[in-house]
Structure formats: C-alpha cells, structure tokens
Image (cartoon, rainbow, N blue to C red):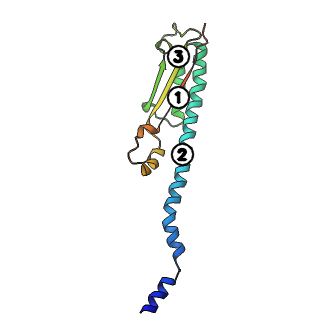
Amino acid sequence: MKGRLVYTLKDERGSSVVGYVVVAPFLLWFFMYLVLGGAYFMRRNDMVNLINTKFDRALLEGQFTAELKAELVDGLSGMGFEREKLEIEVTPEEAFDGSDETYVPRGREMGITVLYRSPHPFYYINRVMAPGISEQRFYIGARVTGMSEKW
C-alpha cells in the first residue's frame, strides 16, 4: 500500500493540464482586459476627434449653432452612442442660446462638454478586481475649450 502511494505521488501525468486549468482563467481575464481597455480608449478618442471638428467650426462662428449640435449628435449616434444618453453642455450661455444673432466675441473662451451616460463594457471587467468601483468612472466623455474667433 505504501509503495502504491509513493508511486501515485511521483506520477506527474496530468500536471500540465492542472497547471493550465489554474492559469487559463487569469490569462483569459488579462487578454479581455487588454482588448476592452483598448476599445474604451479608441471609442473615447473617436468621440474627442468628432467633437474637435465640430467645435472648431463653432469657434469660427462664435456660437455652437443648432445645426452643429445636430451634426454632432448624428455623428455620435453613427458611432453607436445612443442619443438619449448623450449630454451636451456649451459655455458660456450666449454660445448656445439658440439664437444666431448672439455670439461670443473674439478672445473669450468657449467650452463644450459631451458625456455619454452609460458605462463602457470595460467597467464590468474592472469590477472583477475592484468591486466597489463606480460605473460613472467609465462613462465616455470629453471637454474641449478654445477661444472664439468671431469679431
């Protein structure tokens, strides 16, 4: 009986499978973390690029017009952002008051903040390691500022 126990303990068949079963979930989680992290930052970068193109036009006009807002929302919804979850805020008030008569004079700062109120899937994989993390930290958003060019 003792000899059989010693033989069983020295037998290493299947040890590589056990090692794989132990390590595979961590490798899969790490791979998914890299993929979702990259997707999160690419999506944010796409949003920032679109905001910059529309906001550059607003800086030239001194106002973020309803037409520019519609183009921005259409562009973002074309990227997969749901319209209902988008929040757009433009400062100062005269830059986004709905009137084409008012504008921000040259040299004054204008800003736009766009926030998508839904967590990216990257949040769910981060929640595995940090269960108390807030989903708001994984909302995609951007703030862009610039000086008005309108005389």
Name the residue beneath numbered marker 2: 37
Rendered residue at 61%/15% (across/down): 60
Earlier in the chain: of badge 2 and badge 3, it is 2
Tag in front: 2 or 1: 2
Locate residue 12, reporting x and y percent.
Answer: 53, 80
- Amino acid type at image mark 1: Asp
Residue placed farthest to the left in the image?
132
Earlier in the chain: of badge 1 and badge 3, it is 3
- Amino acid type at image mark 2: Gly
What is the C-alpha distance between the residues marked 2 and 3? 34 Å
Name the residue beneath numbered marker 1: 74
Q: Secondary structure at mark 2?
A: helix
- Amino acid type at image mark 3: Thr
Locate residue 126, reporting x and y percent.
Answer: 46, 48
Earlier in the chain: of badge 2 and badge 1, it is 2
Name the residue beneath numbered marker 3: 65
Q: Is residue 151 above or below residue 54?
A: above
